[in-house]
Protein backbone atom coordinates (compact mmCIF):
# COMPACT_ATOMS: atom_id res chain seq x y z
CA UNK A 1 0.00 0.00 0.00
CA UNK A 2 1.60 3.27 -1.15
CA UNK A 3 1.53 6.69 0.50
CA UNK A 4 -0.90 7.81 -2.21
CA UNK A 5 -3.40 5.04 -1.46
CA UNK A 6 -3.06 5.44 2.32
CA UNK A 7 -3.79 9.14 2.11
CA UNK A 8 -6.76 8.40 -0.15
CA UNK A 9 -8.10 6.04 2.50
CA UNK A 10 -7.57 8.68 5.18
CA UNK A 11 -9.54 11.17 3.10
CA UNK A 12 -12.47 8.76 2.94
CA UNK A 13 -12.46 8.45 6.73
CA UNK A 14 -12.09 12.23 7.11
CA UNK A 15 -15.17 12.70 4.95
CA UNK A 16 -17.11 10.19 7.05
CA UNK A 17 -16.09 12.04 10.24
CA UNK A 18 -16.88 15.45 8.72
CA UNK A 19 -13.41 16.94 8.98
CA UNK A 20 -11.82 18.92 6.19
CA UNK A 21 -8.20 18.63 7.30
CA UNK A 22 -6.28 16.25 9.54
CA UNK A 23 -2.96 16.70 11.37
CA UNK A 24 -0.57 13.77 11.82
CA UNK A 25 2.49 14.60 13.94
CA UNK A 26 5.57 12.57 14.78
CA UNK A 27 4.52 11.74 18.30
CA UNK A 28 2.96 9.42 20.85
CA UNK A 29 0.92 10.19 24.00
CA UNK A 30 4.20 10.63 25.91
CA UNK A 31 5.51 13.13 23.32
CA UNK A 32 8.56 10.93 22.72
CA UNK A 33 11.22 11.67 20.13
CA UNK A 34 11.77 8.03 19.20
CA UNK A 35 8.50 6.17 18.85
CA UNK A 36 7.23 2.63 19.28
CA UNK A 37 6.27 1.19 15.89
CA UNK A 38 2.63 1.45 16.99
CA UNK A 39 2.79 5.25 16.88
CA UNK A 40 4.77 5.82 13.67
CA UNK A 41 1.62 7.06 11.93
CA UNK A 42 3.18 9.94 10.01
CA UNK A 43 5.90 7.66 8.66
CA UNK A 44 3.35 5.00 7.71
CA UNK A 45 1.15 7.50 5.90
CA UNK A 46 3.76 9.58 4.08
CA UNK A 47 6.77 7.29 3.58
CA UNK A 48 9.05 9.96 5.08
CA UNK A 49 11.33 8.30 7.66
CA UNK A 50 12.87 11.32 9.38
CA UNK A 51 12.43 11.63 13.14
CA UNK A 52 10.66 15.01 12.98
CA UNK A 53 7.79 16.28 10.86
CA UNK A 54 4.07 16.98 10.74
CA UNK A 55 1.79 15.83 7.92
CA UNK A 56 -1.34 17.80 7.05
CA UNK A 57 -3.98 16.31 4.75
CA UNK A 58 -7.02 18.02 3.26
CA UNK A 59 -9.39 16.62 0.65
CA UNK A 60 -7.34 18.23 -2.13
CA UNK A 61 -3.85 18.80 -0.72
CA UNK A 62 -1.21 17.21 1.47
CA UNK A 63 1.91 18.83 2.92
CA UNK A 64 4.68 17.88 5.32
CA UNK A 65 6.63 20.29 7.52
CA UNK A 66 10.11 19.36 8.69
CA UNK A 67 13.29 21.17 9.73
CA UNK A 68 16.65 21.71 8.03
CA UNK A 69 18.08 18.40 9.24
CA UNK A 70 15.75 16.57 6.86
CA UNK A 71 15.26 18.82 3.82
CA UNK A 72 17.31 16.67 1.44
CA UNK A 73 16.02 13.37 2.82
CA UNK A 74 12.40 14.54 2.69
CA UNK A 75 12.73 15.69 -0.92
CA UNK A 76 13.87 12.21 -1.90
CA UNK A 77 11.33 10.24 0.14
CA UNK A 78 8.30 12.40 -0.71
CA UNK A 79 8.99 12.37 -4.44
CA UNK A 80 6.00 11.04 -6.35
CA UNK A 81 3.64 11.01 -3.36
CA UNK A 82 1.91 14.31 -4.12
CA UNK A 83 2.92 15.57 -0.67
CA UNK A 84 4.32 19.10 -0.69
CA UNK A 85 7.50 19.64 1.34
CA UNK A 86 7.34 22.73 3.56
CA UNK A 87 10.80 23.69 4.80
CA UNK A 88 10.47 25.10 8.29
CA UNK A 89 12.48 28.21 9.04
CA UNK A 90 13.07 29.18 5.42
CA UNK A 91 11.77 32.39 3.76
CA UNK A 92 8.38 32.00 2.13
CA UNK A 93 7.37 28.85 4.02
CA UNK A 94 3.94 29.24 5.57
CA UNK A 95 3.22 28.00 9.07
CA UNK A 96 0.83 25.06 9.32
CA UNK A 97 -1.92 27.39 10.52
CA UNK A 98 -1.42 29.88 7.66
CA UNK A 99 -1.31 27.05 5.15
CA UNK A 100 -4.59 25.65 6.50
CA UNK A 101 -6.23 29.07 6.32
CA UNK A 102 -5.11 29.39 2.69
CA UNK A 103 -6.51 25.98 1.73
CA UNK A 104 -9.74 25.76 3.73
CA UNK A 105 -13.05 27.58 3.51
CA UNK A 106 -14.49 29.30 6.55
CA UNK A 107 -16.45 26.99 8.85
CA UNK A 108 -14.19 24.09 7.86
CA UNK A 109 -13.09 21.68 10.59
CA UNK A 110 -9.57 20.53 11.47
CA UNK A 111 -9.21 17.19 13.22
CA UNK A 112 -6.36 15.75 15.25
CA UNK A 113 -5.65 13.32 18.07
CA UNK A 114 -5.12 15.47 21.16
CA UNK A 115 -2.97 12.79 22.79
CA UNK A 116 -0.23 13.45 20.23
CA UNK A 117 0.34 17.18 20.66
CA UNK A 118 1.84 19.22 23.50
CA UNK A 119 -0.85 21.30 25.15
CA UNK A 120 0.87 24.60 24.39
CA UNK A 121 1.23 23.82 20.68
CA UNK A 122 -2.33 22.56 20.28
CA UNK A 123 -3.74 25.50 22.21
CA UNK A 124 -1.87 27.97 19.98
CA UNK A 125 -3.05 26.22 16.81
CA UNK A 126 -6.67 26.18 17.96
CA UNK A 127 -6.56 29.88 18.85
CA UNK A 128 -5.11 30.88 15.47
CA UNK A 129 -7.63 28.83 13.51
CA UNK A 130 -10.59 30.15 15.50
CA UNK A 131 -9.55 33.68 14.50
CA UNK A 132 -10.29 32.62 10.92
CA UNK A 133 -13.63 30.96 11.77
CA UNK A 134 -12.22 27.45 11.51
CA UNK A 135 -13.33 24.85 14.06
CA UNK A 136 -11.30 22.07 15.65
CA UNK A 137 -12.05 18.51 16.78
CA UNK A 138 -9.18 17.37 19.03
CA UNK A 139 -10.52 13.91 19.87
CA UNK A 140 -10.14 12.19 16.53
CA UNK A 141 -7.93 9.12 16.22
CA UNK A 142 -8.50 8.38 12.54
CA UNK A 143 -5.30 6.39 12.11
CA UNK A 144 -6.66 3.46 14.14
CA UNK A 145 -9.54 3.26 11.68
CA UNK A 146 -7.35 2.81 8.61
CA UNK A 147 -4.11 1.15 9.78
CA UNK A 148 -4.75 -2.56 9.50
CA UNK A 149 -2.08 -4.89 10.92
CA UNK A 150 -0.87 -2.01 13.08
CA UNK A 151 1.99 -3.05 15.39
CA UNK A 152 0.88 -3.65 18.97
CA UNK A 153 2.12 -1.57 21.89
CA UNK A 154 5.51 -2.80 23.16
CA UNK A 155 5.48 -4.91 26.30
CA UNK A 156 9.10 -5.45 27.30
CA UNK A 157 10.11 -5.96 30.93
CA UNK A 158 11.12 -2.93 32.98
CA UNK A 159 14.12 -3.18 35.29
CA UNK A 160 15.41 -1.21 38.25
CA UNK A 161 18.61 0.81 38.10
CA UNK A 162 20.92 0.34 41.06
CA UNK A 163 21.96 3.12 43.42
CA UNK A 164 25.59 2.88 42.24
CA UNK A 165 24.36 4.19 38.87
CA UNK A 166 21.63 6.61 39.96
CA UNK A 167 23.34 8.22 42.95
CA UNK A 168 19.91 8.77 44.55
CA UNK A 169 17.11 6.47 45.73
CA UNK A 170 13.51 6.75 44.59
CA UNK A 171 12.71 8.17 48.04
CA UNK A 172 15.42 10.80 47.56
CA UNK A 173 13.93 11.83 44.23
CA UNK A 174 10.35 11.91 45.51
CA UNK A 175 11.58 14.10 48.35
CA UNK A 176 13.28 16.48 45.92
CA UNK A 177 10.11 16.69 43.79
CA UNK A 178 7.99 17.41 46.87
CA UNK A 179 10.29 20.23 47.94
CA UNK A 180 9.80 21.82 44.51
CA UNK A 181 6.03 21.30 44.74
CA UNK A 182 5.95 23.14 48.04
CA UNK A 183 8.03 25.99 46.61
CA UNK A 184 5.45 26.31 43.83
CA UNK A 185 2.48 26.09 46.20
CA UNK A 186 1.36 23.02 44.27
CA UNK A 187 0.11 19.75 45.73
CA UNK A 188 0.99 17.30 42.95
CA UNK A 189 2.57 16.80 39.55
CA UNK A 190 1.78 14.49 36.68
CA UNK A 191 4.60 12.65 34.87
CA UNK A 192 3.78 11.85 31.26
CA UNK A 193 7.12 11.73 29.44
CA UNK A 194 8.90 8.40 29.59
CA UNK A 195 12.27 9.80 30.64
CA UNK A 196 10.71 11.71 33.55
CA UNK A 197 9.01 8.52 34.72
CA UNK A 198 12.18 6.45 34.30
CA UNK A 199 14.32 8.95 36.23
CA UNK A 200 11.84 9.45 39.08
CA UNK A 201 11.28 5.76 39.75
CA UNK A 202 14.83 4.58 38.87
CA UNK A 203 13.53 2.20 36.22
CA UNK A 204 14.61 1.55 32.67
CA UNK A 205 13.22 -0.56 29.84
CA UNK A 206 13.38 -1.63 26.22
CA UNK A 207 10.06 -0.42 24.81
CA UNK A 208 11.55 2.19 22.50
CA UNK A 209 14.53 1.85 20.22
CA UNK A 210 17.63 3.76 21.43
CA UNK A 211 16.02 5.24 24.58
CA UNK A 212 16.10 2.82 27.56
CA UNK A 213 12.59 3.60 28.78
CA UNK A 214 9.34 1.76 29.40
CA UNK A 215 5.75 2.77 28.61
CA UNK A 216 4.47 4.23 31.87
CA UNK A 217 2.95 7.30 33.49
CA UNK A 218 3.54 8.73 36.96
CA UNK A 219 1.94 10.85 39.66
CA UNK A 220 3.60 12.44 42.67
CA UNK A 221 1.82 14.39 45.40
CA UNK A 222 2.91 15.58 48.81
CA UNK A 223 1.74 12.26 50.28
CA UNK A 224 1.52 9.75 47.42
CA UNK A 225 3.47 8.39 44.47
CA UNK A 226 1.97 6.19 41.74
CA UNK A 227 3.58 4.40 38.82
CA UNK A 228 1.10 3.51 36.07
CA UNK A 229 2.54 0.51 34.23
CA UNK A 230 1.32 -2.84 32.92
CA UNK A 231 1.82 -5.47 35.60
CA UNK A 232 3.39 -7.83 33.07
CA UNK A 233 6.34 -5.42 32.79
CA UNK A 234 7.16 -5.50 36.52
CA UNK A 235 8.56 -8.59 38.22
CA UNK A 236 8.03 -9.30 41.92
CA UNK A 237 11.44 -7.98 42.96
CA UNK A 238 11.00 -4.61 41.23
CA UNK A 239 7.43 -4.28 42.52
CA UNK A 240 8.57 -4.95 46.07
CA UNK A 241 11.43 -2.45 45.91
CA UNK A 242 9.11 0.26 44.58
CA UNK A 243 6.54 -0.42 47.28
CA UNK A 244 9.28 -0.15 49.90
CA UNK A 245 10.15 3.28 48.47
CA UNK A 246 6.54 4.43 48.88
CA UNK A 247 5.36 3.88 45.31
CA UNK A 248 1.97 2.35 44.47
CA UNK A 249 1.62 0.55 41.14
CA UNK A 250 -1.53 0.81 39.02
CA UNK A 251 -2.27 -0.34 35.44
CA UNK A 252 -0.99 1.81 32.57
CA UNK A 253 -4.51 2.05 31.15
CA UNK A 254 -5.80 3.74 34.33
CA UNK A 255 -3.58 6.83 34.08
CA UNK A 256 -5.69 9.14 31.92
CA UNK A 257 -8.87 8.45 33.89
CA UNK A 258 -7.00 8.99 37.17
CA UNK A 259 -5.65 12.34 36.00
CA UNK A 260 -9.10 13.52 34.92
CA UNK A 261 -10.57 12.83 38.37
CA UNK A 262 -8.05 14.35 40.76
CA UNK A 263 -9.49 15.92 43.89
CA UNK A 264 -10.79 19.39 43.05
CA UNK A 265 -8.62 21.08 45.64
CA UNK A 266 -5.40 19.78 44.09
CA UNK A 267 -3.05 22.33 42.52
CA UNK A 268 -1.22 20.45 39.77
CA UNK A 269 2.23 21.40 38.50
CA UNK A 270 2.13 20.73 34.78
CA UNK A 271 4.47 21.40 31.87
CA UNK A 272 2.40 22.62 28.89
CA UNK A 273 5.23 21.63 26.53
CA UNK A 274 5.65 18.10 27.92
CA UNK A 275 2.03 17.16 28.64
CA UNK A 276 -0.29 16.17 25.82
CA UNK A 277 -3.35 18.27 25.04
CA UNK A 278 -5.88 15.65 26.08
CA UNK A 279 -4.41 15.04 29.55
CA UNK A 280 -3.70 18.71 30.24
CA UNK A 281 -7.21 19.72 29.15
CA UNK A 282 -8.89 17.05 31.28
CA UNK A 283 -7.01 18.24 34.40
CA UNK A 284 -7.69 21.89 33.56
CA UNK A 285 -11.44 21.25 33.70
CA UNK A 286 -11.29 20.35 37.42
CA UNK A 287 -8.08 21.68 38.89
CA UNK A 288 -5.98 24.77 39.22
CA UNK A 289 -2.75 24.33 37.28
CA UNK A 290 0.67 25.76 38.04
CA UNK A 291 2.42 25.92 34.68
CA UNK A 292 6.11 25.13 34.95
CA UNK A 293 8.87 23.23 33.26
CA UNK A 294 8.43 19.62 34.39
CA UNK A 295 9.93 19.30 37.87
CA UNK A 296 11.64 15.92 37.17
CA UNK A 297 13.00 17.35 33.91
CA UNK A 298 14.67 20.20 35.78
CA UNK A 299 16.02 17.92 38.51
CA UNK A 300 17.41 15.17 36.26
CA UNK A 301 19.16 17.67 33.98
CA UNK A 302 21.63 18.39 36.80
CA UNK A 303 23.54 15.13 37.11
CA UNK A 304 24.77 14.26 40.57
CA UNK A 305 28.40 13.37 41.34
CA UNK A 306 27.76 9.63 40.98
CA UNK A 307 26.09 10.06 37.60
CA UNK A 308 28.87 12.31 36.31
CA UNK A 309 31.57 9.86 37.37
CA UNK A 310 29.66 7.01 35.73
CA UNK A 311 29.38 9.04 32.53
CA UNK A 312 33.14 9.59 32.58
CA UNK A 313 33.65 5.83 32.83
CA UNK A 314 31.24 5.25 29.95
CA UNK A 315 33.25 7.76 27.89
CA UNK A 316 36.43 5.76 28.45
CA UNK A 317 34.75 2.60 27.15
CA UNK A 318 33.26 4.50 24.24
CA UNK A 319 36.65 5.98 23.43
CA UNK A 320 38.26 2.54 23.41
CA UNK A 321 35.55 1.24 21.08
CA UNK A 322 35.90 4.22 18.74
CA UNK A 323 39.68 4.00 18.69
CA UNK A 324 39.45 0.38 17.62
CA UNK A 325 36.81 1.29 15.06
CA UNK A 326 38.99 4.05 13.58
CA UNK A 327 41.93 1.66 13.31
CA UNK A 328 39.67 -0.83 11.53
CA UNK A 329 38.38 1.89 9.19
CA UNK A 330 41.87 3.01 8.24
CA UNK A 331 42.90 -0.55 7.43
CA UNK A 332 39.62 -1.54 5.73
CA UNK A 333 39.79 1.36 3.29
CA UNK A 334 43.03 -0.09 1.94
CA UNK A 335 42.21 -3.80 1.86
CA UNK A 336 38.46 -4.08 1.13
CA UNK A 337 35.37 -2.38 -0.25
CA UNK A 338 33.20 -0.84 2.44
CA UNK A 339 30.12 1.36 2.37
CA UNK A 340 28.24 3.66 4.73
CA UNK A 341 25.97 0.88 5.97
CA UNK A 342 28.93 -1.40 6.75
CA UNK A 343 30.55 1.39 8.75
CA UNK A 344 27.43 1.91 10.87
CA UNK A 345 27.25 -1.81 11.65
CA UNK A 346 30.94 -1.93 12.52
CA UNK A 347 30.67 0.93 15.03
CA UNK A 348 27.94 -0.95 16.86
CA UNK A 349 30.02 -4.13 16.82
CA UNK A 350 32.97 -2.42 18.52
CA UNK A 351 30.73 -0.76 21.12
CA UNK A 352 28.88 -4.00 21.86
CA UNK A 353 32.11 -5.58 23.12
CA UNK A 354 32.40 -3.00 25.91
CA UNK A 355 31.25 -3.76 29.45
CA UNK A 356 27.74 -2.55 30.36
CA UNK A 357 26.84 -1.76 26.74
CA UNK A 358 23.09 -1.96 26.14
CA UNK A 359 22.35 -0.45 22.72
CA UNK A 360 23.07 2.43 20.39
CA UNK A 361 21.73 5.78 21.61
CA UNK A 362 20.45 6.61 18.11
CA UNK A 363 20.80 5.23 14.62
CA UNK A 364 24.32 5.91 13.30
CA UNK A 365 24.69 8.75 10.81
CA UNK A 366 27.39 7.78 8.36
CA UNK A 367 27.53 10.25 5.49
CA UNK A 368 30.21 10.02 2.83
CA UNK A 369 30.77 12.86 0.34
CA UNK A 370 27.47 14.69 -0.37
CA UNK A 371 25.53 12.36 1.97
CA UNK A 372 27.37 14.13 4.79
CA UNK A 373 25.39 17.26 3.96
CA UNK A 374 22.15 15.45 4.87
CA UNK A 375 22.14 16.29 8.56
CA UNK A 376 20.34 13.18 9.85
CA UNK A 377 21.11 10.85 6.96
CA UNK A 378 20.47 7.18 7.65
CA UNK A 379 22.19 4.75 5.29
CA UNK A 380 20.39 1.66 4.05
CA UNK A 381 21.95 -1.21 2.09
CA UNK A 382 20.28 0.28 -0.98
CA UNK A 383 21.27 3.94 -0.45
CA UNK A 384 24.76 3.43 0.98
CA UNK A 385 27.66 4.95 -0.91
CA UNK A 386 30.85 3.00 -1.39
CA UNK A 387 33.58 4.81 0.55
CA UNK A 388 36.69 5.73 -1.39
CA UNK A 389 40.02 7.14 -0.29
CA UNK A 390 39.09 10.73 -0.98
CA UNK A 391 36.87 13.42 0.48
CA UNK A 392 35.10 13.67 3.82
CA UNK A 393 33.38 10.94 5.81
CA UNK A 394 31.07 12.16 8.61
CA UNK A 395 30.26 9.70 11.41
CA UNK A 396 27.77 10.60 14.16
CA UNK A 397 26.99 7.81 16.61
CA UNK A 398 26.38 7.03 20.23
CA UNK A 399 26.00 4.28 22.79
CA UNK A 400 23.79 3.46 25.74
CA UNK A 401 25.76 1.98 28.60
CA UNK A 402 24.23 1.27 32.00
CA UNK A 403 26.63 3.88 33.38
CA UNK A 404 26.08 6.55 30.75
CA UNK A 405 24.88 7.78 27.36
CA UNK A 406 27.30 8.89 24.63
CA UNK A 407 26.96 10.93 21.44
CA UNK A 408 29.95 11.83 19.27
CA UNK A 409 30.62 13.08 15.74
CA UNK A 410 33.92 12.93 13.92
CA UNK A 411 34.52 14.00 10.34
CA UNK A 412 37.52 12.35 8.70
CA UNK A 413 39.27 13.37 5.51
CA UNK A 414 40.30 10.33 3.49
CA UNK A 415 42.92 11.94 1.24
CA UNK A 416 44.39 15.42 0.78
CA UNK A 417 41.84 18.19 1.47
CA UNK A 418 41.22 21.02 -0.95
CA UNK A 419 41.72 24.59 0.33
CA UNK A 420 37.93 25.01 0.76
CA UNK A 421 37.59 21.68 2.59
CA UNK A 422 40.45 22.54 4.93
CA UNK A 423 39.12 26.02 5.62
CA UNK A 424 35.60 24.73 6.33
CA UNK A 425 36.92 21.98 8.59
CA UNK A 426 39.04 24.43 10.57
CA UNK A 427 36.12 26.85 10.99
CA UNK A 428 34.01 24.05 12.48
CA UNK A 429 36.86 23.02 14.78
CA UNK A 430 37.37 26.62 15.92
CA UNK A 431 33.69 26.85 16.82
CA UNK A 432 33.78 23.63 18.82
CA UNK A 433 36.93 24.75 20.68
CA UNK A 434 35.63 28.24 21.44
CA UNK A 435 32.50 26.84 23.09
CA UNK A 436 34.58 24.25 24.95
CA UNK A 437 36.74 27.01 26.46
CA UNK A 438 33.83 29.22 27.54
CA UNK A 439 33.65 30.62 31.06
CA UNK A 440 30.41 32.32 31.99
CA UNK A 441 28.55 33.72 35.01
CA UNK A 442 25.78 31.92 36.84
CA UNK A 443 22.45 32.66 35.15
CA UNK A 444 23.79 32.32 31.60
CA UNK A 445 21.48 30.73 29.04
CA UNK A 446 22.60 28.51 26.18
CA UNK A 447 21.29 31.11 23.76
CA UNK A 448 23.96 33.51 25.00
CA UNK A 449 26.77 31.04 24.31
CA UNK A 450 25.62 29.75 20.92
CA UNK A 451 27.39 32.51 18.98
CA UNK A 452 30.77 31.33 20.31
CA UNK A 453 30.48 28.24 18.09
CA UNK A 454 29.42 30.25 15.04
CA UNK A 455 31.38 33.49 15.08
CA UNK A 456 34.37 32.23 13.08
CA UNK A 457 32.17 30.91 10.28
CA UNK A 458 29.88 33.95 10.40
CA UNK A 459 32.88 36.07 9.48
CA UNK A 460 33.08 33.99 6.28
CA UNK A 461 29.34 34.24 5.57
CA UNK A 462 28.63 30.64 6.66
CA UNK A 463 26.08 29.26 9.11
CA UNK A 464 24.30 26.01 10.01
CA UNK A 465 20.57 25.51 10.56
CA UNK A 466 20.46 23.33 13.66
CA UNK A 467 21.29 24.03 17.29
CA UNK A 468 24.80 23.73 18.66
CA UNK A 469 23.97 21.72 21.76
CA UNK A 470 21.24 19.53 23.25
CA UNK A 471 21.04 18.03 26.72
CA UNK A 472 22.00 14.37 27.17
CA UNK A 473 20.66 11.94 29.77
CA UNK A 474 22.42 9.58 32.17
CA UNK A 475 21.59 6.19 30.61
CA UNK A 476 18.46 7.90 29.33
CA UNK A 477 17.44 9.89 26.28
CA UNK A 478 20.30 11.07 24.10
CA UNK A 479 18.29 14.25 23.46
CA UNK A 480 17.18 15.66 26.79
CA UNK A 481 15.92 19.02 28.00
CA UNK A 482 15.32 21.46 29.32
CA UNK A 483 18.60 23.26 28.49
CA UNK A 484 19.96 23.81 25.02
CA UNK A 485 22.63 25.78 23.18
CA UNK A 486 20.99 27.25 20.10
CA UNK A 487 19.96 30.65 18.64
CA UNK A 488 16.31 30.22 19.68
CA UNK A 489 15.56 31.79 23.04
CA UNK A 490 15.39 29.28 25.90
CA UNK A 491 14.97 30.70 29.42
CA UNK A 492 16.63 27.70 31.10
CA UNK A 493 20.05 28.62 32.47
CA UNK A 494 23.06 26.31 32.33
CA UNK A 495 23.80 24.84 35.75
CA UNK A 496 26.55 22.59 37.16
CA UNK A 497 25.83 18.96 36.38
CA UNK A 498 24.10 19.63 33.07
CA UNK A 499 25.54 17.57 30.20
CA UNK A 500 25.09 18.75 26.63
CA UNK A 501 26.52 18.32 23.18
CA UNK A 502 28.85 20.75 21.41
CA UNK A 503 28.43 20.22 17.67
CA UNK A 504 28.96 23.09 15.21
CA UNK A 505 28.91 22.19 11.54
CA UNK A 506 29.15 23.27 7.91
CA UNK A 507 27.10 21.64 5.16
CA UNK A 508 27.64 22.15 1.45
CA UNK A 509 24.76 20.57 -0.46
CA UNK A 510 25.97 18.19 -3.14
CA UNK A 511 29.54 18.24 -1.79
CA UNK A 512 30.08 17.28 1.86
CA UNK A 513 29.17 17.84 5.49
CA UNK A 514 31.49 18.58 8.40
CA UNK A 515 30.46 18.23 12.04
CA UNK A 516 32.66 17.77 15.10
CA UNK A 517 30.89 16.88 18.34
CA UNK A 518 31.91 16.30 21.92
CA UNK A 519 29.77 16.08 25.04
CA UNK A 520 30.50 18.69 27.68
CA UNK A 521 29.42 19.05 31.32
CA UNK A 522 28.80 22.36 33.04
CA UNK A 523 30.97 22.56 36.17
CA UNK A 524 31.97 25.24 38.66
CA UNK A 525 34.93 27.43 37.74
CA UNK A 526 35.52 30.19 40.32
CA UNK A 527 33.74 32.78 42.42
CA UNK A 528 34.71 36.41 42.95
CA UNK A 529 33.15 39.80 43.60
CA UNK A 530 31.22 39.46 40.32
CA UNK A 531 29.58 36.22 41.34
CA UNK A 532 29.88 32.53 40.49
CA UNK A 533 31.38 31.51 37.17
CA UNK A 534 31.04 28.19 35.37
CA UNK A 535 32.93 26.40 32.60
CA UNK A 536 32.70 23.18 30.61
CA UNK A 537 34.43 19.87 31.18
CA UNK A 538 34.86 17.95 27.92
CA UNK A 539 33.70 14.37 28.50
CA UNK A 540 34.13 12.71 25.09
CA UNK A 541 37.41 10.85 24.54
CA UNK A 542 38.31 10.28 20.90
CA UNK A 543 40.98 11.76 18.62
CA UNK A 544 39.96 14.58 16.31
CA UNK A 545 41.21 14.22 12.74
CA UNK A 546 44.00 16.75 12.18
CA UNK A 547 44.60 16.17 8.48
CA UNK A 548 42.31 18.98 7.32
CA UNK A 549 43.31 21.56 9.94
CA UNK A 550 44.79 24.83 8.68
CA UNK A 551 47.09 25.57 11.61
CA UNK A 552 47.44 29.23 10.64
CA UNK A 553 43.70 29.68 11.19
CA UNK A 554 43.93 28.55 14.83
CA UNK A 555 44.75 31.01 17.56
CA UNK A 556 47.54 29.98 19.99
CA UNK A 557 44.84 29.38 22.60
CA UNK A 558 42.87 27.09 20.26
CA UNK A 559 46.00 25.18 19.30
CA UNK A 560 46.82 24.74 22.99
CA UNK A 561 43.30 23.44 23.64
CA UNK A 562 43.45 20.70 20.99
CA UNK A 563 46.92 19.62 22.13
CA UNK A 564 45.74 19.37 25.73
CA UNK A 565 42.59 17.55 24.63
CA UNK A 566 44.56 14.99 22.66
CA UNK A 567 46.95 14.54 25.56
CA UNK A 568 43.96 13.77 27.81
CA UNK A 569 42.52 11.32 25.27
CA UNK A 570 45.78 9.40 25.11
CA UNK A 571 46.31 9.44 28.88
CA UNK A 572 42.83 8.07 29.63
CA UNK A 573 42.60 5.48 26.84
CA UNK A 574 46.12 4.11 26.30
CA UNK A 575 46.13 1.72 29.26
CA UNK A 576 42.89 0.13 28.00
CA UNK A 577 44.37 -0.60 24.56
CA UNK A 578 46.87 -3.10 23.21
CA UNK A 579 50.40 -1.86 22.62
CA UNK A 580 49.73 -1.66 18.88
CA UNK A 581 46.49 0.26 19.39
CA UNK A 582 48.14 2.63 21.87
CA UNK A 583 50.92 3.32 19.37
CA UNK A 584 48.33 4.20 16.74
CA UNK A 585 46.53 6.50 19.20
CA UNK A 586 49.81 8.18 20.16
CA UNK A 587 50.38 9.08 16.54
CA UNK A 588 46.84 10.45 16.14
CA UNK A 589 47.13 12.61 19.26
CA UNK A 590 50.57 14.11 18.67
CA UNK A 591 50.99 17.81 19.44
CA UNK A 592 50.37 20.26 16.61
Image: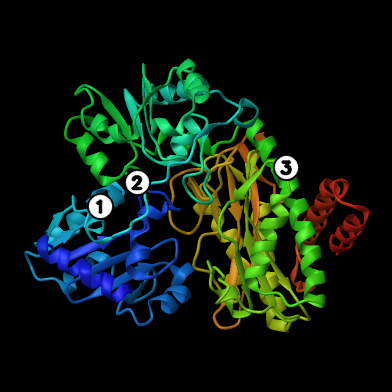
Q: Name the residue under label 3.
A: 355
Q: In this view, does 553 lie above or below 172?
A: below
Q: x, y percentage for residue 483? A: 50, 46
Q: Is residue 121 left or right of residue 234?
A: left
Count all numbered tags in the image, as a single digit. Answer: 3
Q: x, y percentage for residue 8? A: 22, 73
Of 539 and 171, which appears nearest the observer?
171
User: Which mark, residue 369?
Assistant: none
Q: Is residue 543 visible?
A: no
Q: Is residue 540 above or below residue 588?
A: above
CB under 8 Å between callouts 3 and 2?
no
**Crowdedness near tag 1: few (<14), some (14–19) or many (≥20) residues, C-alpha within 10 Å:** some
Q: Mark 2 points at which residue?
A: 273
Q: Name the residue under label 1.
A: 122
Q: Which color scheme did the rendering employ for the protein?
A: rainbow
| First along the sequence among labels 3 and 2 | 2
Disc 3 element: loop
Q: In which quarter of the image is the C terminus?
A: bottom right
Residue 527: name its quadrant: top right
**Residue at the image position 44 percent from the left and 65 percent from the top:** 50
| First along the sequence among labels 3 and 1 | 1
Q: x, y percentage for residue 524? A: 65, 37
> Cα distance, mark 3 to mark 2?
36 Å
**Crowdedness near tag 2: few (<14), some (14–19) or many (≥20) residues, C-alpha within 10 Å:** some
Q: x, y percentage for residue 580? A: 92, 58
Residue 473: name its quadrant: top right
> Cα distance, mark 2 to mark 1?
10 Å
**Crowdedness near tag 3: few (<14), some (14–19) or many (≥20) residues, C-alpha within 10 Å:** few
Q: In which quarter of the image is the N terminus?
A: bottom left
Disc 2 element: loop
Q: Is residue 455 left or right of residue 567?
A: left
Amino acid sequence: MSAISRIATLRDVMNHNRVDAYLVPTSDPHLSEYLPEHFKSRQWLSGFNGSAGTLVVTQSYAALWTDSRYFLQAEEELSGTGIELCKMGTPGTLSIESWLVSKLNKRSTLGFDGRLFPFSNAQATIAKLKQHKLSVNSKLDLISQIWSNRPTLPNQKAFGLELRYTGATVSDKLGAIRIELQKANATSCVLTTLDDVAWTFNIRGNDIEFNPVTLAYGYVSIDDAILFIDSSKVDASLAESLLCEGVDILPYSRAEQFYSKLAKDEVVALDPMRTNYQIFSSILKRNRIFETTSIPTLLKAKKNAVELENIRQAMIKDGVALTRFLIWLEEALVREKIDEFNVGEKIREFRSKQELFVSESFGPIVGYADHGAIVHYSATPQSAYKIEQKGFLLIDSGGQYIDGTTDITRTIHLSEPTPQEASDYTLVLKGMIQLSMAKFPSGTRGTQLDALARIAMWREGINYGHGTGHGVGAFLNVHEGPQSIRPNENPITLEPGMVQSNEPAIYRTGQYGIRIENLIACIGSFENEYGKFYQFETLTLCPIDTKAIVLEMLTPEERKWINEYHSMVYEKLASKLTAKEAKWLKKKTHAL
